[in-house]
Image (cartoon, rainbow, N blue to C red):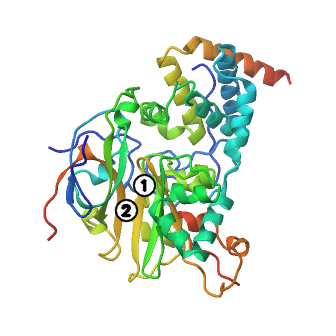
Amino acid sequence: MKSRFQTSDRVRVLHLGKTGHIRTPFYVRGKVGTVSELCGYFLNPEDLAVGKTAGPVVPLYRVSFRQTDLWPDYQGPAHDTLCIEIYDHWLTEGQEAS
Amino acid sequence: MSHSHEHGHDHDHTHDRGHHPSLVIEDEAGNIEGQIIIDALQNILVRKNLLAPEEVTQEIEKIEAPGEHLGARIVARAWTDPEFKERLLANGKSAAAELGIKVGEAQLIVVENTEDLHNLVCCTLCSCYPRSILGQPPSWYISKAYRARTVREPRQILSEFGLNLPDDIELVVHDSNADMRYLVLPERPTGTEGWSQDRLATLISRDCMIGVAKANAAA
Amino acid sequence: MVETTRGYHDIGGNPAGPVPKDELPWLHWEKQVEAVRNLLGDGTRRIISLDELRRGFESFGIEKYSSLSFYRRRVEAMIDILIEKEVITRAEIEAEIETVRARWKNV
């Protein structure tokens, strides 16, 4: 699978409604962040958890979020961020940064 | 299962909401039960020719070997060799290999603290940690309190560890949720000019490589 | 679409009390749990991967997940997956546990 995003792209984390083993935490779903790098291509843990090892590999990105976008009650300065790894199929294009 | 279920309630643990502690600690009975269960499982697997006892002994030695001393070597080298540091920040696994340190995880991402930026690492979903270099994570790292709160109130967490970060320093929290593992490269303490790598390594604690502390001062 | 699926282990952002600073020793049985899992997941066996182990403890139900210690969760998850894959049976492991426990008592 080809990577759909590049460094600096704005991306939104999807609500996929999947059950089973998921490595995309609830707290980033629906949120918009910025791709900081492509980590590489890895087998999807959602499939590996049920023994499906055939692939294909999936692009994995590090995505950076402003803490004030993640938490309405964030107690800290506006420049604080959170960086987390998200697989390609959990992402769609985000809005332009305001 | 028919065995009795024991879990510890150490008298000074803390509770999150609900009646379960943030860190469940086994008491002596619980630890004995744990030993019984793993011995029983190992016995069955050995009888089924899936494991040999000697392999288990060897594997235990292998997982006991890494520890903060390996991370400290990496940091001390990065402090004294700027070109190594650049290679480390570009690809942690291959730079560690230059020192004879084998990273067993998919990749090691080394994040650098500066006078303007501080990094903090956690794993909200379970306990992901660079075990192949730092060994086992500390108990607090796998507690539900650390996992739940670090992404949301990191500055308060740092204060609980005695590190009060001024607001003009940017704080980046890394949730180690997938295939990458993280090592914080702390700032080199002042007053350490000319120190050997071995001497520098004495200032580098496990906690400063997770991000809940700075490297020790050169007192 | 509003997200309706959230594992009970997916606790990032939940309220919680102070971080417990206990520095617990790493005990032999805990190392043995890790060692057995590593061996079962190695290239010659490929019986339990880390992802399957995680699915295991994410399937306990919140009560069991919240009340077991870290390494106890891992050994219980390993047992669940080995039973699922028909490597062992529940009856086998329960019988062996009783056998081992009896030996402890007789020491």
Residue B13 seen: no
Residue type at tag 2: Arg
Asked which secondary structure carries label 1, the reply is helix
Residue B152: mark in rendering: 2
At x 53% / y 51%, what residue is drawn?
B142
Residue B148: mark in rendering: 1
Residue B108 seen: yes
Q: Is residue B131 above or below residue A79?
A: above
Q: Position of residue C28 (x, y in %)?
A: 73, 39
Question: How crowded is the residue under tag 2: few (<14 C-alpha within 10 Å), some, or many (20+)?
Answer: many
B87 or C58: which is nearer to us? B87
Asked which secondary structure carries label 2, the reply is loop
At x 60% / y 68%, what residue is drawn?
B75
Residue type at tag 1: Ala
Q: In this view, does B107 lie above or below B217?
A: above
B84 or C16: which is nearer to us? B84
Instruction: Establish whether labels 1 and 2 are both on one chain.
Output: yes
At x 41% / y 64%, what residue is drawn?
B173
Question: How crowded is the residue under tag 1: few (<14 C-alpha within 10 Å), some, or many (20+)?
Answer: many
Q: Where is residue A25 in the image (x, y as percent from the top left)?
A: 34, 48
Give yes or no for contact between labels 1 and 2 (Cβ–Cβ under 8 Å): yes
